Amino acid sequence: MRKLRFEEFERNSLTVFAISMIANVLSYLYQIVMGNMLTPADYGTVNTLLSLSVVVGVPSGVVAALTATYTAKYHAHGETAALAAFMHRMLRAAAVLAAAVFAAGALLSLPIAHVLQIDEPWYVTTVMILVASNCLGPVFSSTLQGVKRFVPYSMNSVLSFALRLLLGTAFVWLGWGIAGALAALILSACLAMLYCLYKSRDLFFAPKTKQLHLDRDEVRRYFVSTFWFQLFLLLMANGDVLLIKTFAADPAEVGIYSSGSVIGKISLYLANAIVPVLLPMVAERQSTGHDTRQLLKRAMLWGGGVAVVCAVGMNVVGRPLIGLLFGERYLAAIDLLLPISFYVVPVACLTILINYLMPLGRSGFFAVSMVAGYLLIWALVSQLHHSVAQMLYIMGGGLLLVLAANLIYIALTPEKEKAAV
């Protein structure tokens, strides 16, 4: 059983990795095209708004994690009727969350725009439409993940990025600028959601049980722990742009940083190819009473190793790539590749750790350590933000401390105590 599971983990990881490379290429093409078609300041604003949509969209991450975890458990026990009923219940809950997030974001658009130095508050309001649509999509995409249909699950990203690239290029070329880029993001998200609905239609429209028995206390605990996991996960992946946009003296610095992060974060995207496979397999093994710790070790070995190797490689080949892909306006980003790598490696490892802990519902120590880490980062960056590189080194150092603390805690805590966290 153990050998079979490891082979399954690696096989599925390679499948997701191969397809995700197509999505990553499209994502990078989008960044390159937008960087060349927009001014550095507008390019930085688009990336800030995109990062804002992800961070504010924590509820969509919670919906995704809940859906993937519970559909994996129902699928492991062959309970198709319960799986269909769960999808319908999650869709209703996601619709409520989408409406609430949009309303709150729209009301706060003015102060958010002020903090992030965005001239037009309605840009923030428009982004909330994207956030709302992203709350609904995971009901279908994460079901594909939960039942281990990794090919259509991964193709969802390919479709989304392809539409984002095509529509974004067309709309910006028409002279719509930032507004055109935002419209492309919203349309691509909605069309990708329809694709996932089509691919999961046999489950969504299957006969469903009239009584879906869910342990409310268990769901509530899992919701709370998943909320914290998703918040920290999204802050790590996108908080760097928001923090730099907040403290940068020149708006163009954010655009320059974004061009450098396109190259520097390649290692993060490569390492994260195993994440979609890890979560449902951990949930399945836990629900069937099998040990999950070996999956964490294997994921850290592959994911962390890939992150480090790719970070080194990007610092070697990334320098000529920035000038070639983005032009002379962005050459200052070359000096940011090393600090970006210093930030990205702990983010990749913590992302793997989160997707291991999330289906287990173990958020106690991790949440406390992340809150302490981010308070430390904020305190230091608010005082020391003379350059983008300085801010990145502070963020990377803080996350390395959090990673080390959690790995030590997991190593020293007996398994029976960890299960109770």
Image (cartoon, helix red, strand yellow):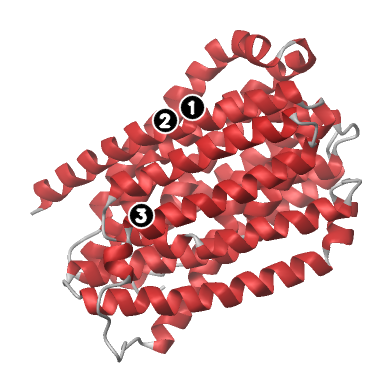
Q: Can residue 199 be spotted in the picture?
A: yes
- For the point 22% across and 40% down, the residue is 10
Q: Which residue is mark 1?
A: 25
Q: Nearer the viewer, residue 409 or 35?
A: 35
- Amino acid at pointer 2: Ile
Number of the label disc, if any, that sits on residue 22? 2
Quadrant of the image for the C terminus? bottom left
- For the point 43% across and 40% down, the residue is 272
Q: Nearer the viewer, residue 264 or 58?
A: 58
- Amino acid at pointer 3: Ala
Q: Nearer the viewer, residue 283 or 380?
A: 283
Mark 2 and mark 1 in contact? Answer it, CB < 8 Å: yes
Give left or right: position of 130 versus 28. right
Q: Position of residue 354 (x, y in %)?
A: 45, 55
- Amino acid at pointer 1: Val
Q: Which residue is mark 3?
A: 411
In space, the residues marked 3 and 1 are separated at their CA atoms by 37 Å
Q: Residues within 10 Å of mark 2 (few under 14, many from 20)?
A: some
Q: Residues within 10 Å of mark 3 (few under 14, many from 20)?
A: few
Mark 3 and mark 1 in contact? Answer it, CB < 8 Å: no
Q: Residue furthest left?
A: 1
**Counting residues from the N terminus, which is met first, the one under dot 3 or under dot 2?**
2
In space, the residues marked 3 and 2 are separated at their CA atoms by 37 Å
- For the point 67% across and 74% down, the residue is 100
In space, the residues marked 2 and 1 are separated at their CA atoms by 5 Å
Give left or right: position of 147 versus 118. left
